[in-house]
Image (cartoon, grey):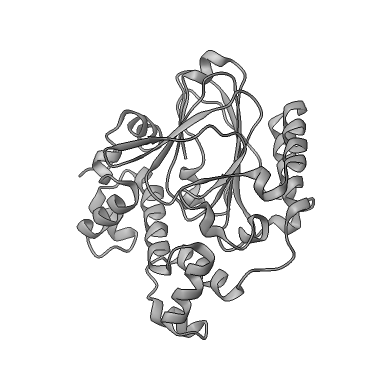
Amino acid sequence: MISTPQERHTPSVLPSRYPQWARTIIPVSPREVMRTFDLSDFAGQFPALANLVEDIADWDIRDGSVARGTTVMVLPSTMPHFVVQYRTRIESSRKFGDATTPHRAYQHIATAVRTGVVTISPHGPLGLIIARLKPEAAACLLGDHLYEFADTKVDLDAVFGAGAVASLEEMLTKAHSSRDRIIAVLRFFSANIRAHEPDPVVCRAAAHLRSNPFLRLGPLAAELGLSERHLSRRFKAVFGTGPKRFARSARVEHVLAASGSGSGWANIACSCGFADQAHMINEFKAILGATPTHFFRSPLTGEYRDSTTAQPPSA
C-alpha cells in the first residue's frame, strides 16, 4: 500500500511481523509524519490476534484540502484487507494494464486485491483504517469462503451485521487518537473471531507458500500428507485460487518489498528466487498488469520509490 500526499499528515501504523513486506502497507514520503505502535504494546490485550493481524494502519487527515491531495494505492497481496472509514467516503478504482474500472460507492468493506492496482482518492477529510489479515487465519474472522472477497468488495454489514459495524463506526468517530481507533478495531476483531480453524492443512500450506513461494507443490503436499491434486482442490475451495497462483502472488509481494533496496531488477530477481529477470517480469506483469519498470515509472509509484531507496532499480 502506498500513500502519496501533497502535504503533511499523520498516518499511524501497527508494524508487520515481516519487515520485508512492510512497504506494501506503510505509507512513506519525505513530507509525512508517522507515529508507529509496537505489536508488544497490544500483546497482553489481544493474544488471540497474534496469528490473524499482519498489520494495521490509520490515515487521519482532518484537513479536506490536504486529504484531496493524497492518494493511497493498494497493491496485490495474498492478504485480505479489512477497511473501515470514519469521515468523508472515499472513491476508488482498479487499474490493470490499460483498463481502469471505477468501484461502486462503499464505506466499510472486506476485500482481497489479487490483481491490478487499486487507487483510493479522498474527496474530503480522510479517516481510513486498513488492516491486512494473514490469509492462513483470515477465515476465522471473515468466514470459510475467502474466495468471495477476491478482487471484489464485500460490505462488512453482510459479514458481521449492520448493528455491530455501526457501533464500530461510532467508536472510531468518537475516538480522540489513532491509538484509540486501532484498539477499537482490534477489540472488534476479538469479539468476532471464530474459535475454529478452517481446513488446517490448507492453512499450513498457505503459511509455507507465503514464507517460501518457490516451494514445489509435490514435496509440500507430501509433507502435509496429501497428493498434489488433493491439496490443489482443497486449497482452491478455501481461497478461490490454486496454490500455484497463490504462490505467484507471494513472489510478487517479495519483489515489491525488495524494490526499495536500490538494487537492479536482475539482482532483485535473483534475491527473490526467480530463475532470471525475464521470469520475474512475467510474474510481475501477470499480477499487476505492468512490468516493474513501467509500474515504477508512474508519478505516484515513482515518488514512493524515490522516498524509500537511495537509488532507483535499474532496468
Q: Residue at x 52, y 53 (%)?
A: 79
Residue 287 located left or right of residue 170:
left
Q: Residue at x 37, y 68 (%)?
A: 214
Depicted 182 relative to depicted 61: above or below? below
Answer yes or no: is residue 315 visible.
Answer: yes
- Residue 18 rendering spot, x and y as whole percentages: 53, 54
Residue 76 located left or right of residue 17:
left
Depicted 231 relative to depicted 271: above or below? below
Depicted 96 relative to depicted 64: above or below? below
The C terminus: image quadrant: top left
Q: Residue at x 52, y 16 (%)?
A: 66
Residue 182 located left or right of residue 240:
right
Answer yes or no: is residue 183 visible.
Answer: no
In this figure, what is the number of numbered marks? 0
Q: Residue at x 41, y 65 (%)?
A: 213
- Residue 6 rendering spot, x and y as whole percentages: 45, 19
- Residue 141 rendering spot, x and y as whole percentages: 67, 56
- Which of the pair 76/296 is nearer the observer? 76
- Residue 7 rendering spot, x and y as whole percentages: 49, 18
Residue 97 located left or right of residue 48:
left
